[in-house]
Structure formats: C-alpha cells, structure tokens
Image (cartoon, rainbow, N blue to C red):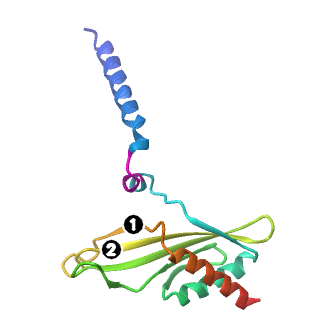
Amino acid sequence: MNPMIRLTNAALWAIAASLMLCAGCDEIPDSLRDRVDGAEAPHVRVYAADQRTTYLGARAAVDQLGFRFVRGGPATGQLEALSELSPGDSQGSTQQFSLKAKFSPTLDGGTEVSVWLKEIVEADSTNHQGFATESPLRDTPLYETFFRAIQQGIDGKK
C-alpha cells in the first residue's frame, strides 16, 4: 500500500477520534470542566460610584471581613486578598480563602465589580507544606457579605 494513503488514513482516524472525544464535552462534570476551562464565572455587582471610590469601598470591605490585602490598586482595577489560615476539616490540614476582584467602569459613570472566591485547602500542612488545592466557591453567602460591605464603604466615603 502506498505510504501516502496510509498517512491519510491515519490522519482521518485521528480527526474522527478527536471529534468523537469533543462531542461528549457537555457530559463532563463541572469540577473537571473548571480545571480544563480554568475560568469560573464571577459574581458581579454594579455600583453607582466611580472606580476609585468603589475600589476604596472594596478595600475597606476586605479589611472588615478579616482578609489580608495582597495586591492591586484603583489604577489597575484589581484587588486580591487572602483570609487568615484556619484549621481544616481533617487533622493537620489548613484552609484559607482567596478573593479576587476586578473593577470596570460602566457607561453611566458607575463601576462593575466582578468577584471570584476560592477555597484553598492544604490536606497535610505538617508534612507537605505548599501542596494545596484550590476550589472555586460558587454559592457562598460571602459574596453577598462582601458586596454589602463594599456599599457600606462607598456610603462612608460620601
């Protein structure tokens, strides 16, 4: 058989196999899809204040919730913070929460705030420090608490 025909047949089989694999992508569980996509949808709120004022309100909210500021600023439109380390569910484990917020101006002069929260768990912090897993938090009241604290911070700046 001609080597070119064998190569073409192999290429066709490879294309067919990849199409069959991709056809079932909707059936992949959410946790696996999150790892593949790498992007969790943020929780979003719009405030009737400019970006700087909203950022300052969020910065005050982070402090109020006991998070430690990591990086960001009103000019960059980003804020990142971490909660304190706390004991995890199993002995020797620790947990921590991370918060990432993005600030975008709206057409009417307000600010849209997009927030992502993640839980960071280190299963055996005594023997394997630095080996942690991150999981997005989808339905936690911490989002609403943070958004309310931002509004309180904005109201306090007026």
In front: 78, or 83?
Answer: 83
- Residue at the spot 28% in from the left edge and 9% down from the top edge: 2
Q: Which of 26 and 101 is in front in this view?
A: 26
For label 1, the residue is 135
Sort mark 1 into few (<14), some (14-19) or many (20+) by Cα contacts within 10 Å: some
- Residue 126 occupies quadrant: bottom left
Do labels 1 and 2 touch, CB within 8 Å?
A: yes
Three-letter code for the amino acid on which mark 1 is drawn: Ser
Q: Where is residue 139 in the image (x, y as percent from the top left)?
A: 48, 68
Give the numbered dot on residue 121.
2
Tell me: 19 left or right of 129. right
- Dot 2 crowding, Cα within 10 Å, few <14, some 14–19, many 20+: many
Identify which amino acid the numbered label 2 is placed on.
Val
Residue 120, given in percent of the width and then of the height, sits at 37, 73
**How many angstroms separate mark 1 from mark 2 (CA)?**
8 Å
Question: In this view of the protein, can residue 72 be seen by the observer?
Answer: no
Q: Residue 150 carries which label?
A: none
Of residues 48 and 102, the one drawn nearer to the viewer in this rendering: 48
Q: What stretch is highlighted in magenta?
A: 28-33
Residue 143 visible at all: yes
Asked if residue 78 is among those painted magenta in the image, a careful observer would answer no
Residue sitting at x 38%, y 51%: 29
Q: Which picture quadrant has residue 42?
A: bottom right
Decide which of tag 1 and tag 2 comes sooner along the chain: 2
Residue 66 placement (x, y as % from top left):
48, 89
Give 47 or 131, whichever is nearer the viewer.
Answer: 47
